[in-house]
Image (spheres, grey):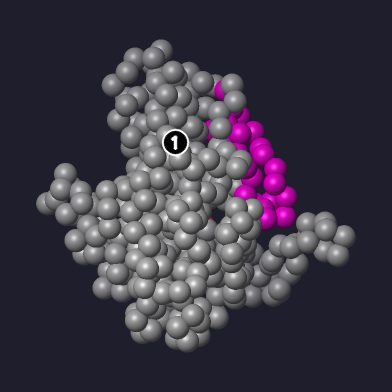
């Protein structure tokens, strides 16, 4: 199974040690989270990010709250409410908190702390196994392309849905890593993903893994797709509705539309924790609005390698910063899950326990 070069999170005594993604790709530093507020802040400001990783981090956040303040109902309720309020779109966060609540609520207060650590670890391990299984299914898509075309399989992705976003190999990038392990030549076209530039995280992790990549400005995706320079688009998701509409990082839906127009297959890789069968369609998915600063400023390094924030637009500029958008099911060729690949509007076939 894929081993993360640096664990995205790990328990150390009564704290959670995370890889601080706000410093990547410039610096690779870990940070210890010791309180509920530390964990909530880390999720809110995106020190940890990516739907599955947010869920697992929140689960450990519940354990941290209980170990510091005791297992009483009031402590549990506060931890669940505080963490649930950090980010709205990725349903994995709410899935993980509901799973923690289901396990912990029936227990006496004294038994909740150990149970919380154990359940958070189970959520982390479940995600790693899920990434591996989805990667094996996604591999079949890349194998089919490699079988009919000479040269590298050219995969376009958006945002970061690699190991940095999960507790395992990633969602959209798991098939890429699986293909590499099977000796298939793969090249990834990585869009920078303004405003937070998660594409730079994707470029960083692919480069470290020795996977060929081409970094593009987001606006270049349409041309590359139209010119036949992409074999397949694979992105992750933050919430997939019952009808197969999928929310992912803003800009994803434009890639799906351009891929549809160019006849390029467009896949979403989404684990079970991202599927929201209680949400009828994409219109019901809450879209996170983030601050103007993310659009008006940019982070990089100066000539001396020092981390620097630059202002791109005046602070009082009127800004819209929706962090996600929704791709309609009809533009999605298939959803890659740990149970197999299904057309977006037939997802329930893979999850009969959720059929209505
Ligand atoms: O705002 P982020 O960086 O947490 O958003 C992440 C994404 O949108 C990912 O594409 C998504 O979580 C994919 S699943 C790993």
Residue 251 in the image, given as x and y percentages of width and height: 47, 71
Q: Position of residue 124 (x, y in %)?
A: 44, 36
How many marks can you see? Answer: 1
Q: Residue placed at 18% from the left, 54% from the top?
A: 348
Q: Callout 1: 10 Å neighbours few (<14), some, many (20+)?
A: many
Which residue is farthest right? 304
Can you give x and y, in whole percent of width and height, for residue 301 in the image?
Answer: 78, 61
- Above or below 110: residue 133: below
Quarter holding residue 233: bottom left
The residue positioned farthest toward the top in the image shown: 110
At x 61%, y 70%, the residue is: 215
Q: Position of residue 315 (x, y in %)?
A: 69, 70
At 48% from the left and 51% from the top, the residue drawn is: 181
Beta carbon of the mark 1 residue lies under 8 A of ligand 1: no
Q: Nearer the viewer, residue 233 or 330?
A: 233
* Range of magenta residues: 14-41
Q: Is residue 2 above or below residue 142?
A: above
In this orientation, which residue lies closer to the viewer: 42 or 161?
Answer: 161
Q: Quadrant of residue 103?
A: top left
Q: Which residue is mark 1?
A: 124
Say what secondary structure mark 1 lies in. helix
Q: Answer left or right for 26 relative to 266.
A: right
Which residue is farthest left? 356
From the viewer's perspective, tell me whether residue 217 is left or right of residue 133.
right
Q: Is residue 84 visible?
A: no
Q: Does 35 lie within the magenta span?
A: yes
């Amino acid at each position: 199974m894929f081993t993360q070069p640096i664990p995205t999170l790990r328990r150390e005594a009564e704290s959670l040690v995370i890889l601080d993604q706000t410093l990547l790709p410039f610096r690779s530093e870990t940070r210890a989270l010791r309180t509920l507020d530390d964990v909530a802040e880390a999720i809110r400001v995106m020190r940890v990010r990516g739907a599955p990783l947010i869920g697992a981090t929140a689960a450990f956040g519940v354990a941290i709250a209980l170990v510091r303040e005791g297992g009483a109902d009031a402590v549990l309720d506060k931890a669940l409410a505080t963490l649930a309020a950090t980010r709205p779109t990725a349903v994995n966060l709410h899935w993980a908190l509901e799973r923690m609540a289901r396990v912990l609520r029936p227990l006496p207060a004294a038994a909740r702390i150990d149970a919380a650590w154990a359940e958070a670890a189970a959520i982390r391990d479940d995600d790693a196994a899920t990434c591996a299984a989805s990667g094996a299914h996604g591999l079949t898509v890349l194998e089919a392309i490699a079988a009919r075309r000479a040269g590298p399989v050219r995969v376009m992705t958006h945002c970061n849905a690699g190991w940095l976003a999960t507790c395992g190999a990633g969602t959209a990038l798991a098939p890429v890593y699986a293909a590499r392990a099977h000796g298939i030549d793969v090249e990834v076209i990585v869009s920078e993903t303004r405003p937070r530039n998660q594409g730079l995280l994707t470029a960083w992790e692919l480069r470290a893994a020795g996977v060929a990549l081409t970094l593009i400005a987001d606006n270049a995706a349409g041309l590359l797709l139209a010119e036949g320079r992409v074999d397949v688009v694979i992105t992750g998701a933050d919430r997939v509705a019952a009808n197969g509409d999928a929310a992912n990082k803003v800009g994803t839906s434009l890639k799906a539309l351009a891929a549809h127009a160019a006849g390029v297959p467009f896949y979403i890789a989404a684990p079970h924790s991202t599927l929201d069968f209680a949400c009828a369609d994409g219109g019901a998915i809450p879209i996170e609005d983030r601050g103007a600063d993310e659009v008006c400023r940019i982070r990089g390094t100066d000539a001396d390698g020092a981390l620097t924030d630059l202002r791109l637009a005046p602070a009082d500029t009127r800004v819209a910063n929706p962090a996600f958008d929704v791709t309609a099911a009809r533009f999605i060729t298939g959803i890659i899950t740990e149970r197999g690949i299904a057309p977006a509007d037939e997802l329930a076939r893979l999850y009969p326990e959720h059929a209505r």
